[in-house]
Amino acid sequence: MKVALGVTGGIAAYKAAEIVRLLQDRGVRVQVIMTRAAQEFVRPLTFAALSGEKVITGMFAPGEEHTPNIDSAIEHIAVAQSMDALLVAPATADVLAQFAQGIAPDFLTTLYLATTAPVVVAPAMNVNMWNHPATQANLDTLRKRGVKVVEPGSGYLACGMVGQGRLAENEAIVAAVMEALGTSQDLAGETILLTAGPTREKIDPVRYLTNRSSGRMGYAIAEAALRRGARVLLVAGPTNLTPPGAAETTRVESAEEMRNAALNLLPQASIVIKTAAVADYRTKNSAGQKIKRQGPMTLDLEPTPDILKEIAARKQSQTVIGFAAETENVLEHARQKLAAKNLDAIVVNDVSREGVGFDSDRNAVTIITRDEVIEVPETSKWDVAQRVLDIAVKLRARQKTSVEA
Ligand code: PMT
């Protein structure tokens, strides 16, 4: 998802830097557009460094104002077409007036007219400017057009006056943008401990026991949870995937390392989701040197620690969701694991089916809680991730209500 962030000229312009970071935490790419006045308050370089994108400071690239280069103009139009929402924060009385009247002297105001994406504005200004009938009329016009206005807060203003006009809290602005993008923030305030990928159990320095898990299911949940406002603590076995930038990732190899990392992080978590395909066995003693080929051999194996069972045994108020990879009697085995591991829910996939489960972009699962069974027919792992998180939100709400009662 990509958001165009328009920064206009006000004392609160520096706060937009934090908004860039909060949006990135939710997996959103940010293209910053600064008006000429905004550049008097903050240098474009600050936003370029934070967003990792070129900042748009005018209709044409710097130096091209008198000899316009059509390539720059086309590049800018491409930005308008690729963005999923336009946010203006802080929005001055002036830019609100221009939006309302359809006056477009610069890139930001032109973009507003050109885009069909949802628009969110977060005004910040002097209290008298905010209360002025002209500003309020412009805001009414914009609201009627479907623009979401994140109301400014009250308090001491930079101009020395007291009243309404302070830029709303960054979290509230970001929540409005995520809502405009169709992503609810129902996991805001939750910390999800998530395990993903396989583990590797060493046989000797060059060989190991493992399984076909790619980590895609777990990484999809990580990304989806971040977008829904959660903090994500990701414990990842060896995979080729790049974890979402905002996930706090711990890389592990073996079941023992995964256990230690997960148990260390458990006190910080409110929800645990265990998609990892932990190897069930490891060698009793891994060889210090490469084992030579000498005809038939037998490996002496022992079970790895059952991390999920240990987590569920130690949980305080956490909601714990396990996964189950089954090939026969799928629902029955999953129900047994739900009870034996004392889980709040289990997500079972039939990994004998072609094209779903291990190492695929698709999955088909059944989510079993203590009182409901939800079928999720074959779909993308992204959709499965959303359904699993829907259940997590529901279980969490129920848990909170029962604690309060
Ligand atoms: O990674 P992908 O390629 O995207 O594939 C996704 C997946 C198929 C791996 C995933 O959807 C899935 O099914 N994960 C669970 C795999 C698994 O190990 O299932 P299980 O039935 O063996 O284990 C049940 C639960 O106990 C799991 O939550 C597992 O993390 C946990 N467990 C198992 C063994 C062990 N020693 N410790 C554990 O914590």
Image: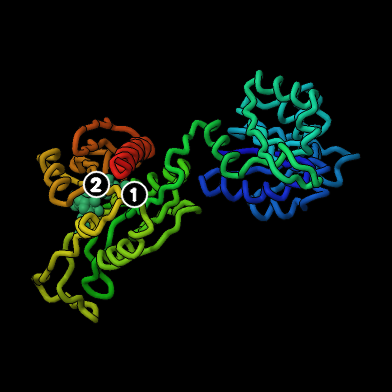
Q: Amino acid at mark 1?
A: Ile
Q: Amino acid at mark 2?
A: Phe
Residue 397 spot, x, y in % from top left:
34, 39
Q: Residue at x 75, y 34 (%)?
A: 108
Q: Residues within 10 Å of mark 2 (few under 14, many from 20)?
A: many
Q: Are the two marked residues, 1 and 2, in contact with CB atoms closer than 8 angstroms?
A: no
Depth check: give the residue in front, 224 or 162: 162
Residue 270 spot, x, y in % from top left:
35, 51
Quarter of the figure with residue 236: bottom left
> Is residue 374 at all visible to an observer of this figure?
yes
Q: Residue 271 got which mark?
A: 1
> Is residue 362 at all visible to an observer of this figure?
no
Count all numbered tags in the image, as a single digit. Answer: 2
Q: Residue furthest right?
A: 66
Spatial CA distance of label 1 from label 2 is 14 Å
Q: Which image quadrant: the C terminus? A: top left
| Left or right, 136 with reference to 389 | right
Residue 333 spot, x, y in % from top left:
12, 44
Tell me the colour scheme of the image. Answer: rainbow
Ligand 1 near label 2 (Cβ, under 8 Å)?
yes
**Mark 2 = which residue?**
323
Q: Residue at x 19, y 34 (%)?
A: 371
Quarter of the figure with residue 168: top right
Depth check: give the residue in front, 108 or 293: 108
Q: Residue at x 77, y 36 (%)?
A: 127
Query: Of marks 1 and 2, which one's residue comes earlier in the chain?
Result: 1
Depth check: give the residue in front, 18 or 400: 400
Q: Residue at x 50, y 31 (%)?
A: 182
Q: Nearer the viewer, mark 1 or mark 2?
A: 1
Q: Secondary structure at mark 1?
A: strand
Residue 101 spot, x, y in % from top left:
79, 21
Q: Which image quadrant: the N terminus? A: top right
